[in-house]
Amino acid sequence: MRILITGGTGFVGRWATAALAAAGHDVYVTSRNFLSMQGCEVIVCDLLRPEGLDVAFARARPEVVLHLAWYVEHGKFWDAVENLDWSAATIRLVSAAEKWGVRRIVCAGTCMEYDLSEGGACNEATTAIRPLSLYAVSKDSIRRIVGKFAADSGMEFVWARLFFLFGPNEHPNRLVSSIVASLLSGRPAKMTSGSQIRDFSDVRDTGEALAALALSKVTGAINIASGQPLRIRDFAEEIRVAAGNVGELRFGALPDRPNEPAAIVADVTRLRDEVGFRPIRTIRERLSETIEWWQGELDLQLKVHMRATYAVSK
């Protein structure tokens, strides 16, 4: 199968790309810069420019599109104007996909589209939609527009709502990476009260779930998550155990965010029963792998620093 992936070099996309390439499909990945990715072809183009779409579709001629690209700079994306740019780019992408005969398109949404004041597990069919940030509103608007267009044109459409992720290459200021880096570096990990309940998934499992979804016949909204409610305080303790009981967790050192939902957890019935996806490793195993990756990164940074210091001293 010929598959075009946008955002295939990113935090999530690289794992979906790897899974689809390993399964033997012809995978094409868009990127603004040239780079090498094993098992797939990288198409250099800018999706924010209309001519970039022509380049991508003419080269890939895909049957399936997995659209993961969006503006997600940590701490800035929630209300950034770039959400408008990517909304427009996504509409152009879907229009081009229909013209090029794409039969199936999978787009990434967010759990923040849901009405999170209701409590309980978020269900694709029964939980109300009430996005609050510009990011979530933009995502939900795209879901509605593309869903209608796909239904009218006969294209299969899937909306994958992602929940909370961790894993290799995570931004260092996100929750899990910041805790791991602090513990491994001997600094106290400063946290809020940790009373919130969240649904965490390893990014590798999320990538594999997206790959399975791209190859399936399932349509509509699908939650991509573990389905396991974890109190952040307990999750942080799990991280510390996986790190070898090193360091210190300082709960309450940071204030809780006002109006933050008490619980955000997914109902993964559709993912499990219709897509047939189940992670092959437990969250504890994935935490251990993530900590090992971060230890390697910290060791590398130390070696680079020592070489630089030695070079200056000579």
Image (spheres, rainbow, N blue to C red):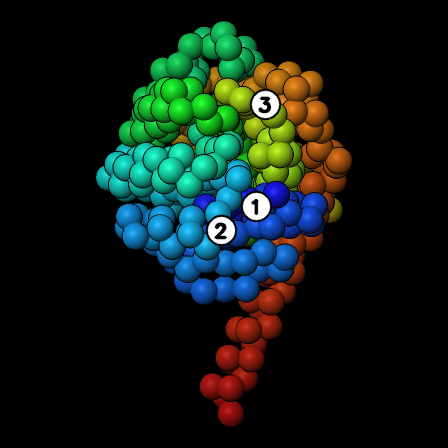
Residue 173 visible to an observer of this rendering = no
Q: The N terminus appears in which quarter of the rendering? A: top right
Q: Is residue 76 left or right of residue 215?
A: left
Q: Could you say which disc has been placed on residue 218 in the image? A: 3
Q: In front here: 141 or 202?
A: 141
**Residue 193 location, x and y as percent?**
50, 27
Q: Amino acid at mark 3?
A: Val
- Say which label, 1 or 2, has the lower sequence index: 1
- Say which label, 1 or 3, has the lower sequence index: 1
- Residue at x 42% of width, y 10% of height: 128
* Residue at the spot of label 2: 60
- Nearer the observer: mark 1 or 3; the answer is 1
- Residue at x 41% of width, y 60% of height: 44
Q: Quadrant of residue 99?
A: top left
Residues under labels 1 and 3: Cα distance?
A: 18 Å
Q: Amino acid at mark 2?
A: Ala
Q: In front here: 61 or 11?
A: 61
- Nearer the observer: mark 3 or 2; the answer is 2
**Residue 300 location, x and y as percent?**
60, 67
Q: Are marks 1 and 2 in contact (CB under 8 Å)?
A: yes
- Residue at x 48% of width, y 47% of height: 61
* Residue at the spot of label 1: 2
